[in-house]
Amino acid sequence: MSFLPCGVYHEKYSQQHSWWQTAFVRGKMILLFVFLLVLIPLYAGNYWLSVASLVGYTILSAMGVQLLIGYCGQVTLGHAAFIAVGAYTSAILMLQYETPYLLSLAAAGLVAGFWSVVFGLPSARVKGFYLIMTTMAAQFITVDFVITQYVSQIGGRGVALSIPPGTISVGPWAIDNDLKVYFLMIALVTLCTLGVSNLMRTKIGRAWIAIRDNDIAAETMGVNIVAYKLLAFFVAGVLGGIAGAFWVSSLAALSPEHFQWGWSLWIVGVILIGGVGSTHGTIFGALFMTLILEGLKFAVIPLSEDFPQLQEKFLFIKESSFGLAICLFLLFEPKGLAYRWWQIKNYFNLWPFSY
C-alpha cells in the first residue's frame, strides 16, 4: 500500500529505511533522472549547460560545509582553501606526472582531507568564534601564501596553471566540451550525495549530530569528541577536494583568484538559504543562488543600454543581492528552503486530512 490519509504505511523495517519509500516517490525520481540525463542534454545550449555545471560545483563545494556546520556543529569560514588544495593537487598530478584524471581526483580528495584535519586540530580545544578565526586562517595561509607563493610556481608556469584541451579524460573519453563536463558533474554530485546521505545513517553520522546538539552530553554517552570532529573535518576536506578537482575540468587556466575568501562566505550563505542540516538544503541553496544571479544578469543586460553604469557595477549588485537574500531568509524563512519543501511534501502526503 502506497498511501493512507495518515501518511505512508510500512510493513517491514527495511521499507522504512529505503531511499524511495513509495511508488509515487520512485516515479518522481525517474522523471528527475529523465530530465537531468535526457532533456537537459538534448535541449539545453552550451550556456545553460555551463550554468548547470556551476550549480553542481556549488553543490559539491557546499556539501562539506553542510557536513561541518549543519551536521557536526563546527563553524567554518575557510572551506575554499580545501577546494583550492583539491584543484591544484589534481592539476599538478595531471600536468607534471601525467596521472589519469580519476586517480588525480581521488588524490585531490585525500590531500585536501588531510590538509583539512591540520586546521581542524584546534577544534579539539576551541569552538564558536575561535574556531571561525582558525578556519579563516586556513583560507589565508593556504591560498594567499602557500598556493600563491609556492604551489602555483611548480613547473615554471607562473601564477596561473594552463589546462590544455584534452588534459582531462576518463578512460578513452576526453572531457573537452560543456556536455561532457555536465555529465561528469551529474556523476560526482550523485555519488557524493549518496555517500554523505548514507554516512549520516551510520554510527558516525549519529555521533556528529550528537556533537552538534550537545557535545558535553555526547561525550558523557561515550562519543569520542576529538576523533569524530577530526573525522568530520577530513570528510569535509575530501568533499572540498573533489569539488576543486571537478572545477579544473571547466577552466582553461587555474589561478588562486578562483578560490578567494568570498567563495567561502558564498557557500556558507548557500546552506543558510537552502537549509542547515539537510542534504536537500545544499541542492536547493545552490540552485536558488545560481539561478537568481543568472536572472539578475538577464535583468541588467537590457537596462545597461540606458544605464551603462549598471553593467560596470554588476559585481556590487551581485554581492548586495547575496547579502539581501541571506537577511530575508533569516527573517522570514530561517529554516531554509528545505524546510519549506518538507512542509509541502507533508501537506500533499496527508491530503485531504492535512490538518
Image (spheres, grey):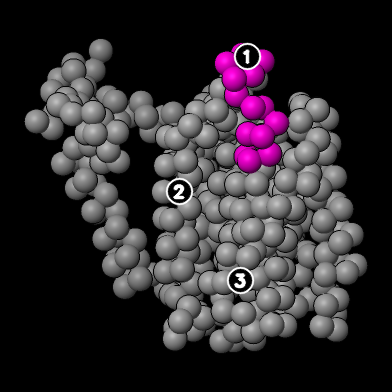
Distance from Cα at disc 3 to Cα at disc 2: 19 Å
Q: Residues within 10 Å of mark 2 (few under 14, many from 20)?
A: few
Instruction: Report the residue marked by disc 3.
Output: 104
**Mark 1 is on which residue type?**
Thr
Q: Horizontal and vertical percent for residue 14?
A: 24, 34
The answer to whether residue 150 is left or right of residue 327 is right
Measuring from the top left, give residue 22's x and y in whole percent.
19, 37
Residue 39 seen in this snapshot: yes
254 in relation to 71, above or below = below
Amino acid of disc 3:
Ser
Q: Nearer the viewer, residue 232 or 340?
A: 232
Q: Which residue is mark 1?
A: 220
Which residue is the site of mark 2? Answer: 195
Q: Which residue sits at x=29%, y=33%?
A: 17
Give the farthest residue toward the front.
222
- In the displayed structure, 335 sits above or below 304; it is above
Determine whether, in the image, residue 335 is placed left or right of residue 352: right
Q: Quadrant of the N terminus?
A: top left
Residues 20 and 116: in front is: 116
